[in-house]
Image (tube, rainbow, N blue to C red):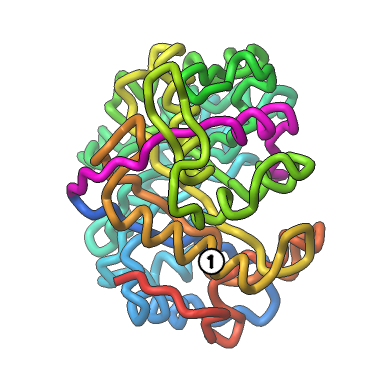
Amino acid sequence: MDNKSFSASMVSTILLLGTLMATLHTTEAEVGVCYGMMGSNLPSRGEVIDLYKQNNIKTMRLYDPDREALDALRGSNINVMLGVSNPDLQKIASNQAEADTWVQNNVINYANDVKFRYIAVGNEAKPGLDFSQYLVPAMRNIRTALNSAGLGNIKVSTAIETGALSDDPNDVFPPSKGKFRQDYRPILDPLISFLNENNAPLLVNLYPYFSYTGSNGKINIDYALFRPSAPVISDSGNGLSYRNLFDAILDTVYAALEKSGGGSLEIVVSESGWPSAGGQATSMDNAKTYNTNMVEHVKGGSGTPKKPGRPIETYVFAMFDEDKKTPDFEKFWGLFTPNKQPKYPINFN
């Protein structure tokens, strides 16, 4: 998770967004958990994989090709989103042989008994970051390497943050007006083209927590925590209404994609969660409420008001608290403590 932020103006407008929760239920969506390793005294990789299996967590986001974790995943039947770290993008983009080597070492060598679903090339590229210029060229080289290895079934994508959405209220309110920031277009336009060409989803790190804390009290916490029993806000442009902030933000991204040539793309929520301590509105109860309600909402299969009945594949951030992170609230997103005890009950069945 990298410097999550959601501009106050964007957030305040999202407060005003809304639409009727769809009642159409289809295929149950998968819920995975992100496996970050920036914590002290975390269990061994093998113990972590066992913990996933014991809790019926069938999908994992692994940020780097950690060899011990990949070895432990052999034969586990856990679907894996494997990351290419941002510092590696330049060399992979500049040389097909580097991409071939990365895929050989981290995918081909494990592909017989590890279920790779996605390769997430980079995380949260944004204007001003050096690695961003290498993002799509690196994705193309990884795609070429996978195809050459007969692994075309593995999708190649990248995760963006919702800070890519415009901070002009006229561009984001209501959700149907969703639009990307202009300074992100040099990154997003070639990315969307690549995803269209390869029939791959866009990964989005989506955090109502940051929208709520950045809204200066304009967003009701119940709306952020999936607690309202009735629609909170309406989108008069299309007659929809929203009961939770998660759906409102997700549909804003879908609307922005439509305006950018990506209207046919699926979205996978590659991170979402709520910290249990260390910052504004952080408590064990709020973390439990958000994550429990989010998992229940996603697994219900109702989709969003804009995309009713479309399963929302989602990854909870994160498996463990990570005490090596800063600031303090970044340390407390885990579902489990380092001794493998759940911080609160959550049902992935």
Residue sitting at the far front: 230
Q: Position of residue 65 (x, y in %)?
A: 49, 56
Q: Position of residue 92 (x, y in %)?
A: 52, 33
Residue at position x 35%, y 35% in the image: 305
For the residue pair 19 and 132, the one nearer the viewer reads as 19
Circle 1 Cα neighbour tier, 10 Å, few/some/many (<14 / 14–19 / ≥20)? some
Residue at position x 64%, y 12% in the image: 182
Splitting the image into 4 quarters, where does residue 275 fall? bottom right
Splitting the image into 4 quarters, where does residue 198 fall? top left
Highlighted range, magenta: 1-26
For the residue pair 281 and 324, the one nearer the viewer reads as 281
Q: State left or right for residue 259 relative to residue 28.
A: right
Q: Main secondary structure of the magenta part?
A: loop
Residue at position x 47%, y 70% in the image: 68
Task: Name which residue type carries label 1.
Answer: Thr
Q: Is residue 236 above or below residue 63?
A: above
Q: Is residue 221 above or below residue 250?
A: below
Q: State left or right for residue 40 relative to residue 104.
A: right
Residue 20 shown in magenta: yes
Residue 156 appearing in the image: no
Residue at position x 48%, y 76% in the image: 45
Q: State left or right for residue 200 relative to residue 150.
A: right
Q: For mark 1, what is the residue? A: 289
Residue 341 appearing in the image: yes
Q: State left or right for residue 83 relative to residue 186.
A: left
For the residue pair 189 and 262, the one nearer the viewer reads as 262
Q: Position of residue 149 (x, y in %)?
A: 25, 40
